[in-house]
Amino acid sequence: MSRVFNFSAGPAVLPEEVLKTAQAEMLEYKNSGMSVMEMSHRSKDFEEILETAEKDLRTLMNIPENYKVLFLQGGGCTQFAMVPMNLMKNKVADYIVTGQWSKKAAAEAKIFGTVNEVASSADKNFSYIPDLSDLNISDNADYVYICQNETVHGTTIRELPNTKGKILVADVSSMFLSEPVDVSKYGIIWGGVQKNVGPAGVTIVIIREDLIREEVLPFTPTMMKYKTHADNNSLYNTPPCYNIYICGLVFKWLLKLGGTSEMKKINEAKAKILYDYLDGSKIFHGTVEKKNRSLMNVPFVTGSKELDAEFVAAATKAGLKNIKGHRSVGGMRASLYNAMPIEGVKALVDFMAEFEKGHAK
């Protein structure tokens, strides 16, 4: 077996250690006589898997007691609707639009009420993060929304916006568990796990208990109410059991590594290797302002669509997979999630250097 270096933005690379554990337990989980895929979500075995996963996540993120952890389905696109459905008391929300995913979230929220774009970086193709220190926050805004790490454009909000007392809601899908976070600064912090935590199919929502309300928009379906899932310990309906199990293995792997503080050091070291090369390259160029660069998603271009395509084809042939940029922006993108080993980043940079030698002007 020969595993490639997988730079996909999601579904994405998983730790080999986790995959090997899952492989060993595929036919039989512990002494249950069956795979996790086959067991009832009401069984004691799965109850233990779910409880342990939540406990370990709470440890990793130091989640305060007054926050609920929900393991949901539907991905980020469902959260784009679920957030306004549950929080739009006044039917007004302020959105900070810094890339494709916050733009999509804002568009969805407009179905349910008034959306004010209080900051945007669309003027420079989402290549930077605007000043968020003194925004014109609406007096009647129900919440302020951000996508903290924009997967497509490769920007990260490092200084959280001054919401002037309003609830902060954050999509952290592509930076989930990549570094420490102060959960208490958010009303809701959520992420689809398929980028940095597990296989596609689970969305983790961490929500302050006072935001779990009976009073939601009147047409909100039962499955779209946070209260439904909070009251039923994420077991109102059959959850994605196997995917939650894999997430739990990833949590164990992270704890063994030393948690999110140690993971941040590793991620900074990986990103530095690639960004340092890009900053010195004559043909490859990063597309994001340096102070706003993501540790997780690194977009870059040559300036020529033809050369970009040639590089992607050559990299793929060399075992550096899924390096092509998002279809909406083109170019290249290397996603350096937690499970990407530093050897993968070094291999990419070495390959880029060889490619550059062959294409020097």
Image (tube, rainbow, N blue to C red):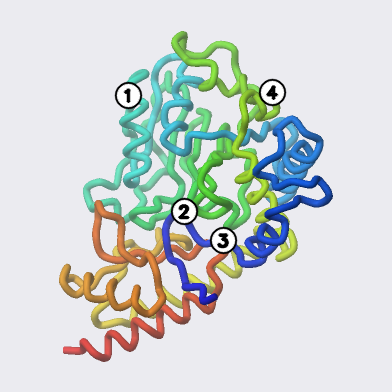
- What is the C-alpha distance between the residues marked 4 and 3? 29 Å
* For marks 4 and 1 on the same chain, the one whose residue lies earlier in the sequence: 1
Q: How many marks?
A: 4
**Amino acid under label 1?**
Lys
Is 301 situated above or below 63? below
**Amino acid under label 2?**
Pro
The residue pinned by badge 2 equals 11
- What is the C-alpha distance between the residues marked 1 and 3? 35 Å
**Amino acid under label 3?**
Leu
Relative side of 196 to 313, left or right? right
In this view, the residue farthest toward the right is: 31
Residue closest to the eye, 37 or 246: 37
Is 3 situated above or below 324? below
* For marks 1 and 2 on the same chain, the one whose residue lies earlier in the sequence: 2
* Label 4 packing within 10 angstroms: few (<14), some (14-19), many (20+): few
The residue pinned by badge 1 equals 110
Callouts 2 and 3 close, C-beta under 8 Å: no
